[in-house]
Amino acid sequence: MESGSRQFPFPYQPYTIQEQFMQSLYCALEQGKVGIFESPTGTGKSLSLICGALSWLRDYEERKRHETAALLQGGEASLSTSSTLPSATPQSSSTCSSSEPDWITDFVQKKAERDMVSKLKDDELKRKKREEKLEMIRNNVQLKYAMKRKGCEDDEAFKLLQLSKEDPAEASGDPEEEELIIADYESDDESKTKNKFCVAEDDEDDDLVEEHVTKIYYCSRTHSQLAQFVHEVQKSPFSQEISLVTLGSRQNLCINEEVRRLGSIQRINDRCLELQKNKQEKQHHEEGVKRKRGPAKSVCPYHGAAALQQLRDEVLGKVHDIERLLTLGRETHACPYYATRFAVPPAQLVVLPYQMVLHEATRRAAGVQLKGQVLIIDEAHNLSDTLSCIHSTELSGVELCRAHSQLTQYSERYKSRLKAKNLMYVKQILFVLEGLVRALGGKVGQNPQSQTTQPGTDLLTINNFLFKAQIDNINLFKLQRYFEKSKISRKLCGFMEKYGGTGVTPHVQTSSNKENRCTDGLNRYLQTLQSSQSTTPVSSADQKGSAELEKVVSASPMMHVEGFLMALTNSNTDGRVVVHRQGTLADSSVKFLLLNPAVHFAQVLKECRAVIIAGGTMQPVSDFKQELLFSAGVGEERITEFSCGHVIPPENILPIVLCSGPSGQELDFTFQNRDAPHMMDETGRILSNICNVVPGGVVCFFPSYEYSRRIISHWEASGALARLSNKKKIFMEPKKASQVEQVLSEFSRCIQRCAVAGGGLSGALLFSVVGGKMSEGINFSDDLGRCVVMVGMPYPNIKSPELQEKMSYLDKHLPHSGGRSPGQALIENLCMKAVNQSIGRAIRHRGDYAAIVLCDRRYSRPSTLSKLPNWIKDQTNTHTTFGPAFAALRKFFMDKRQKQP
């Protein structure tokens, strides 16, 4: 496909809007812009992103090769024609002028030219070797990989650990204890000599890591969305020439069944690191280091250097999704988690979830380097909320008490072996933990379940919270550095793995019996929690509770504490601390709430060459730019926008705003009116009429789970649900995410059977919830979603203290526009973003057709209609009475039926 003078490979003849999309994308990448790209779901956005971005990358690399060749040719020619340096007698300092002599200037210039030519030759040689190796991998040639440094399998395994930034503790002396001891620590200003030495060491470590090539990072919200993107790459013309790597968590990529069985992310991470430490101990033992008697510790069988190298080559040689990576990992007996991280530097396209890009610490741990690279953020309609969520963190009273108890026992056991500086910082952490518990109205060393607190919620600035907790005298920045350098969270986790998972340390003989007595109640309570978790089956209704319980009884909550303290180093104006007391200390919590997501997005925007923010609907763009881009210091001149309509013809969509029902009842689903019996009855009559004329599937969205439960219960009692089931088989959104696929499969099979068999049932009706499991990432194409019904408007809970604080922050820091405050705009935007995501589920391709019925008179307001996607807004008709709306709906489907063969 050709657009102007630019060629874009494409698997089929693209739509005009896809051509325009790729052209705009190419220009944005070339000019280093921040691009906001809006392309409705079903318009081939993913393929347009792939073909446009990879075309630019191909051209960029080709241009770099030509420029390098030209520079090499010119530099070598210049050096070859240069004359020999003239001999000169050095002049005394008294005769030297302020300007350098000509021969010195000439020497410096020639040296710079020689250095440049040497570097260009080196870079060109590396590039050719990389390309030759990839070509050999793709042709299934067996390779012998030569490391930059001389080494064996042990060295290469260590290199992988360096790359992941999760080095196990050095196992010297007695491995049983030494790995748990914090290394000697000195703060930043105390030893300049040591700092210089550390920098040199870091440089050496960096040299071990392969140089990063120019690449594109593509990130999205969920692993299923990432998998869909990889499948699109496999269908693209670039599938045979691009080196792609998919990153994921250990939970998604681990193939060690012993570790996978643990379930929670933290337990999987802890066990993985423990197995690596065991391997280090085994190596030391084989090298002659004496090990204490006892059973041999297990090591991970998937961490061999040769196998990891083989899997890394497989990853780079062909485009694989995560499922295929897991299969290859089992075949090669290599860990996909580490092999994929090892493949990041030479990869051209890296596919990864939001967290690994948008969170700085996670980004470093994954080996992701954004400097000078391209970043594409897909499904970015909720980017602001995502950034806030990633950088917000919460601690329960139980976690705080356990962290204090565990660290106290750790310090008691090892106080004779810890240097004064370590003991000082440990005492500071204990002091901070006491303060946090005090802020919740409790005391450390006692059973948190038996400690009562005065119920209530306080919303405080960071500084006010530090004063309330009486920890304002602690330098949290130094404490944060101590956490990072000492790895105390990991040490404490290993300590608890060794001596007891609940905070009880029966093998630890401490000198403080008083401390043991103080923590007895807490320990008994935690043992009860763990016992009940292991013996009591968890019902679906208690899933959330069981997740919290698992979090509570994990090895150590100190990592959560570390994250919370790091959050408190944000600027006082950028966040708030929510102190939530719920009767007992165990149920109470402290939560950091990020109010200004732009502060963390700014670094990403600064480092990247170009950032593309894409989504099915990005409206309202003006608010998005104000909150995330302008606030991050991005100028208007660097921002470019692209928006397109849908590929479907206008006659294939029928959006209707319904202001009243069949009996003339006005549709006003405000919080005060929606529970009225006559409103619920009228909604049932509307659905009944819709099901009479709409073939196939109807998807009905309610504003919340609670309202869905109440209105369906009302219909059961009134007989309305039975009447609906006479026309359509009824399905409901499942409570468990694991059951979504099963419900969708049964929903689809029912519609297919009805289409073939005919009879009384004309299809199926699915009750779902806005923002629930069915409102995003699920395709209701063709007969699965011939009509989407939106009951009411899904406004967020305006009484939420957190939302009120966010509104107040926006009102104070962002400019007012259009006669509304930024806080009011936030409420409307959250509501309409949720609506747009839900109604966009139905139209998935050019030949698809569907009706969209918005049941609430408030949708008719111009300010609300303006927030609908352009391709829906332009076709929307508002009906104040039900008759004309129903006639339009019936005619729409009759016309479609007549046109079908």
Image (cartoon, rainbow, N blue to C red):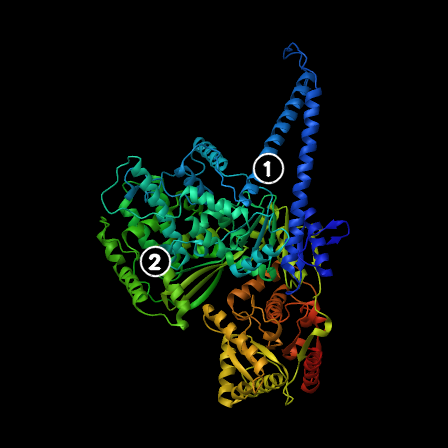
From the top left corner, tell me how far across and down residue 639 is, in percent: 69, 52
From the top left corner, tell me how far across and down residue 32 is, in percent: 67, 47
> Label 2 belongs to which residue?
401
Task: Kindly identify the amino acid type of the residue bearing the numbered disc 1.
Answer: Arg
When asked about the image quadrant of residue 91, the answer is top right
Left or right of 771 on screen, residue 84: right
Residue 255 visible in this rendered orientation of the protein: yes
Which sits in the foreground, 13 or 811? 13
Which sits in the foreground, 226 or 657? 226
Residue 93, compared with residue 501, is above or below; it is: above
From the top left corner, tell me how far across and down residue 340 is, in percent: 49, 48
Q: Residue at x 50, y 44 (%)?
A: 313
Which sits in the foreground, 181 or 736? 736
* Front of the two marks 2 and 1: 1
Q: Residue furthest top?
A: 89
Identify the secondary structure beneath mark 1.
helix
Quadrant of the drawing holding the N terminus = bottom right
> Label 1 belongs to which residue?
127
When asked about the image quadrant of residue 557, the answer is bottom left
Q: Residue at x 48, y 72 (%)?
A: 742
When asked about the image quadrant of residue 401, the answer is bottom left
What is the count of numbered marks? 2
Residue 552, compared with residue 678, is above or below; it is: above
Q: CA distance from mark 2 to mark 1?
A: 55 Å
